[in-house]
Image: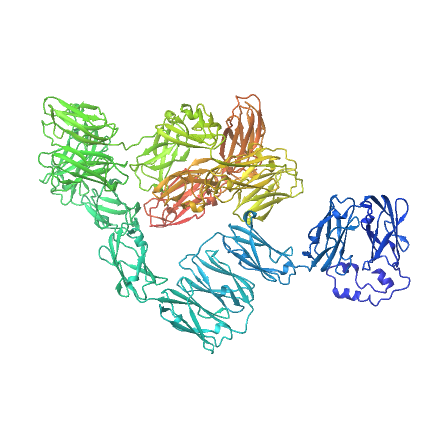
Amino acid sequence: MNAAEQWLDVPQLIQPAEMCNPNVDELSMMTYLSQFPSAKLKSGAPLRPKTNPARVRAFGPGLQPTGNSVGAPARFTVETFSAGRGDLEIVVINPNGVQETCEKVFNKDRNLTYSCHYTPTMEGQYTITIKFAGQDIPKSPFVVGVKGMAGDPSKVTASGPGLEKTGVIVKQKTHFEVHTKNAGMGVVDVVILDPHGHKDTTRPLVTKKSDDLWLVEYAAAGEGLHSVNVFFAGKSIPSSPFGVGVAPAVDPRKCYVTGRGVQANGIRVGDEAVFIVHTAGAGDGELKVEVVGPKAVQEKVRIKKLDATTYECVYEPKKTGEYLVNVTFGGGHVFKSPFVVEVGPTKPTKIRVYGPGLEEGYAHQLACFTVETNGETGALGFSIEGPSQAKITCDDNNDGSANVSYLPTEPGEYAIHVLCDEEDIHGSPWMANIKPASTDFDASKVTASGLGIGKEVMVNEPVEFIIDTSKAGRAPLKVTITDEDHKPVDVSVKDNKDGTFVCHYVPKKAVKHVVVATFGGVMIPNFPARVNVIEKTDPSKVKIGGPAFDGPVKANQPTSFTIDCSKAGSGDIGILMTDANGENVPLETTNLPNNAYKVAFTPEKVGPCTAHVYFADQEVPNSPLKFNVEPGAADASKVQVYGDGVKPTGVLASLPVSFTVDASKAGHGDLDVVIQDPEGNSIQPEVKKSGDGKYNVTYTPEGDGKYKIPVNYGGKPVPNSPFNVNAAPTGDASKVVFADNVKKAVPVGKVSVFKLDPSKAGDGRITCRVDSKADNDVDVEIIDNGDGTVDVAYTPKKPGQYDADIKFGGKTIPNGKFTQQAFNPEDLKRHLQNGGGPEDLISPERVRTVGSAPPGSKGAEEGGPYHPVEFRLPVGPIFSFVSAEITTPSKKKHRPKVVDNKDGTVAIHYSPSEVGLHYLNVTYNDVPIEGSPFQFYVDSIVPGRVTAYGPGLSHGICGKKCEFTIVTKEAGSGGGLALAVEGPSKADMNCLDNGDGTCSVSYVPTAPGEYAIKIMFDDKDITGSPFKAKISPGSDLQTAHVNPDGTGQVALKIAETDLSSLTANIRYPSGKEEPCSLKRLDNGQLGIGFEPKEVGEHLVSVFKHGQHIPNSPFKIYVGEKEIGNASRVRAYGKGLEGGVANELNEFYIDTKDAGYGGLSLSVEGPSKADIECNQESDGICRVRYKPTEPGNYIVNVKFADEHINGSPFMVKVGGQPAGQMSEKILRERNAPDVTHVGSECELSLKIPGINVKELEAVVISPSGASEPCEVSDLGNNEYSIKFVPKEIGVHTVSVKHKGIHIPGSPFQFTVGPITEGGSHKVRAHGPGLEKGEVHVPCYFSIYTREAGAGSLSIAMEGPSKAEIDFQDKKDGSCEVAYTCSEPGDYIITIRFNDQNIPDSPFKVYVAPSGGDRKRMDIRELQEHGCQLNKPAAFTVDMTGTKGKLDARVVAPSGAEDEAIVQEVDKDHCAIRFVPRENGIHKVFVRQNGVPIAGSPFQILVGKIDADPALVQASGDGLSKGRTGQLAKFLVKTTNAGSGALGVTVDGPSKVKLACHEVPEGYEFSYTPTAAGDYLISIKYGGNNHIPGSPFKAHIVGDSQEGKLWNEQSQVVVETVTKSTTTSVFSAAQLLHDADASKVRSEGSGLQKAYINKEATFTVDTSQAGHNMLLVGVMGPRIPCQEVSVRHVGGGRYTIIYRPEEVGNHLLVVKWGDKHIPGSPFHIVVV
């Protein structure tokens, strides 16, 4: 710019810096440049010389130092374009100094070039001098070496795309190769002439690749025929020159693709995916289409050229997954290529879509189509993609179809998606070609009318309609008619030449027809028209069916049937339904498509139900319909209870009263009624069932006061239950007098009688209660003597004090409370001799109602009295199910008194009134109990006659003493007394003379069955002999011996009906608590299973809805012999000595004398061995195992976690290998490149099923500094974790999903050289190591970076050969995918340098495909929110499946425990466990040993505070040690939160792993006894290793005898939160961590309470730290006096308070001095 200003006078209007700025002012720039054309050059200006030889350039093989040969033309080119004017002079001097000829030809091209060549005549050094304008050009003279004779160009060949006649594109590089093998010496030279003969427009690049191969590259500068001349040794090769046609340049971006085959969604397997490629204006190029499916499999593509620029392409996808469609033209991708197409599975559908809007339309005119669902359910949806937004309108026709329209505003191709449940239906999307807007016609102005498009027409009758287009412009009219089978119907369209058209058709079928009319390809208004073609009315063609005919009809359960009138013509229906009582049943009728109707009804009465169905006023065939209504499921809410016996106004004491339970509308269920008197004692009511679902309940309130009557139906309370009834006294008890004296002392075994006179007391009854601490089963008989007096009698059975309370009308009579003392006969004599005085009247401690009798009732018949009869019989758990009836010798029916013993048995008391054989019938739930009917003989008490009485003469229980009494008083000596018992077992009799004319006899039967008791006196049978006694099996099951599952079973004497609401735990003598399993025994009692581990008293607590059931907790004493002792277990059998592959090898384990303990078995060896364990007899287990490969196996037998004597057993297995299929791959892993500070580090992970936004990663440096990593989504479930290190050393990379470490995290990443490697540093993780599915690829990842270089092997063994794919990620990780063809158990073994990596081998169950297995419904599964130490449960619905369920729970620490599986009913099981750790628990559920679908289920307990990435481990014990010496290491958990800390030591010897807490964490110590390598795994907060884990400790020194196996020791510690400031704990610090906001409370007592009744709620402080719980309740006037706060363990409290006044109360709950959430609570007391 300075030179222009100095010599041209052009001023610098702009600065140089401004000119370089992209934002330069354009006007300023233009103004400055406009000065140059008119500028004048000043004299003396420094001009460039006109001739400049330095700018001449010479090049070519003829100037190269080597490569030229004798006799071959040596060619080169000289370019003079920039040198000015001058003459070119070339001199060639041979080795002898003689000049040789050099020819030069001026090419007359724009570069002013000369083509030169000379032909060497001899070998040696040539000198070529080139001058221009008399001066040497640069590099001149050139020295050229000539060697050898020229080669033979005839032996040279050339080939490649650059020599093809077509395919070469302007300005696109192409190439060809020249092969000179066997051609001798020579140089390849190429000259390319353009169509005008110029050879400088295209200059080739010739490169020698080898001695025999030359590569020639060029890019043609223009179009047309080019001549490619190829020379070797200066001569043309065969076929040279080559004619190459250069085509114009191709622009693939001008190509575009249309059609369904490239849509992202909608294509399904088996579809013909079609798309069109348009290449107009893109040039002349080659079209290539490539479709790549899953696993990089290429699909075949058919390409058909429709015209010069249009191609149709078709492919058929064979598998589901992502397909890539690459479309290239002229070598480049066309617009939007590649296309990603998601191919879904084949999914048939009944939905039909049709209409012109699916194919074509015009911009700004509605495009319409119709959707018919044809009965398919699902949510319909529509979406339209195209050049413009298109508003969609959907009109429901209310017949299962809809008319859809959309309004495009721009022309182009539109994709119409029709979706069902958010998935494209078959055929979707449809591709519609929308044309530009047209002004020639307007389809919206077309009208149509006529019967032919009405709602109904008759079949086979001609109909017509008229279409008027006179106001709509000019366009073609198209009319189509189809029936419901989509078959066309002939239609004629007549043009009236006035813009109107007459359409005529004859429907041939009585089905729905659809009429479609378009004008110019656009649907006209009110079309499509749906015409219902009907036949003439014919009721005989009405069809009826549906659920009411397919299965049983249940009372109070809705059902329905369908009336199909589609082929019956037109007409109305009428239905009349009546139940078994002739009453009308309400009906609900719903119209269905195609002239059908749904009739729904809910029958209430059980029995026959009749329905009359009419069509067009005529009864249809099969009418009336008959239904048999069966009892339905119980619905307690529909039970009604009414009658005097439940009126709150009250009843009269001592008088029987009744009430009715109406369950006629409540379905089928069990009725349970309990009467509780004011003192809490139960009174058995008399329940009589009528045939109409009603029950009459009668009971006698024996005393005054408030009675509570709970009524349950089907196990649930009925409305208003329990009922509270007040019993008022009646009569005047003060007027009842004793008619006889009452003795203070009475003999045992003799009837004690009190005579009373209630004749002046008015209405009422005598009742009496007798209680004794010596005898809990005192039967009282009340007999009306018929003379106005009443006898009260009872028989004391044992010596002791008997307290009596006699009432009349509910009140105690004068002197009615007194005490009698019962003595044995000899003691009674001594008592009377010592001056025993008159009776004393005292108050009883407790009473029990035993009998009542009304005045005036018939008493004992003549010849009485009789000995009372007593039975004690096992029944079921529901007392109201028990019914007893006695048939006397005179065939009279008597109801004995039945008393609930609260232990699954009942006591039956009966006072006989006849002599002879009686029968006792006892039923439970209307089914006779075992042994019923029972026989017993009654004889009158007559002095001098030998009689016998007592329960042992009629019944008994196996294994228990049966007793009866023989009376021989005043019978004389006679011939003596003879006794005999005959029955299923020997029963020795024991006879004791009481010294009072009676003797007591007992015997113990040892087998159930019927026994004959023969009693003879004076060689004659006494009356009733032989007596028949039925002996039942024992109902009290004792603790069974060791089960194969290692638990003992104990029967508990409780009776409950709803097992699903019960939970149980056991507290050991040490105070430790854990859950135990519950199961229902055959007799209705509950049993528990547990493994005793401590000597002493155990407490079993059984809870219902969180509250103890009656009699809970139960006490169980465990002795020393019951504790599991492995040394007392014996194993024997051939299977421990040797075995045969593929055969069952068995041995036996005897645990009879070993107490209780878990029995664990494992077989290790060359193959997996299935193990069966069955209990043969008490304490003997038979074990079978079946290895599939021969070799040496180790059989481990442990009892109570200890090896038994001889275990492990070494077993040599012979035989032939099995048919187990195995597959193994081997890959070498190179040592990773050393990572340096400042370089980018990357970790690749495959994590299916997550969102990248939910993923976070943090790297912690060796110094402890942390910073976030960069997380990128790479697609295909792959993610990249990147960070830049700032330090050398081991870094820890934590990768979390939703705040939880992913499997394998935290990862170790070494920056700098890796100093430690080995198999223990390899990590494997992924879903494919837990479960799989046949024919579906299962993935897992292996991280080997920290292990260094080595050999990685992956082996799979199972029912089928697995296809294993291996992909190296090149970053120290690899991805493995396997596919199995058969379901079953597979073993995946991963080894590095021939050593198993941690957790290998992995056992994986591969399930059948989803369609092959029955999926069970999982209900009430709470995946989040479960609390620590609180039962977690869910229900498995097994409907339609058979088999036994088992479940196990794996805690975050890896601890495994059995879950409790309880059968709720035949189709449902409840699965329960009590979590002891915070974190994710995995629940594995199996049926018949096979995992159910969805297993394992993940449940998050509490919250996850623990972060394994922040835990540090240090100490020599992690790396080295010496045998016999203590090795220590420290695990620091400071700032890592609280969680389960699991430490495992695996090595040549079993070590005792000790742990104690220190301020910064936990210190561990162990003492190895054998030398070798020990692996120390440290996990925190779950199955996550801490950084550096597992550690390898090398132990040296003297050792025990070496073993072929490793021993494992493990300790799990539930840690507490520690921080860096925690050093000394004090009370103040313990309270400091309290957080009241984390306290949780629940229970009905937080909302509502009742006056003078206990209200409860619970408070959970387990997550709130340490503090005191303070509770107070304030009423409207006074504070609540009774508030109970009880700690139930684990930071949980139960609070009980009893409000004493009505009104609003304030409930305050504080944790320390802070209110908990919700406090203060406002309680309403009513």
1624 relative to 48, above or below: above
| Residue 587: % across, % down | 29, 59
Q: Is residue 288 visible?
A: yes
852 left or right of 368 in image: left
**Residue at image x 33%, y 46%?**
1700
Q: Residue at x 82, y 51 (%)?
A: 76
Whether residue 1535 appears in this view of the structure is no
How many numbered circles are shown?
0
Which quadrant of the figure has residue 114?
A: bottom right
- Give the colour scheme shown: rainbow
Q: Quadrant of residue 756?
A: top left
Instruction: Identify the image quadrant of the N terminus.
Output: bottom right
**Residue 816: image location, x then y, percent:** 17, 37
Is 1051 on the left or on the right of 430, as rendered? left
Residue 45 rendering spot, x and y as whole percentages: 89, 61
Task: Left or right? Give the position of 1674 relative to 249.
Answer: left
Instruction: State the residue in front, 349 or 995.
Output: 349
x and y percentages locating residue 44 in the rendered image? 91, 62
Question: In the image, is residue 1113 above or below residue 1524?
Answer: below
Residue at image point 68% right, 59% down: 249
Q: Nearer the viewer, residue 1015 or 1697?
A: 1015
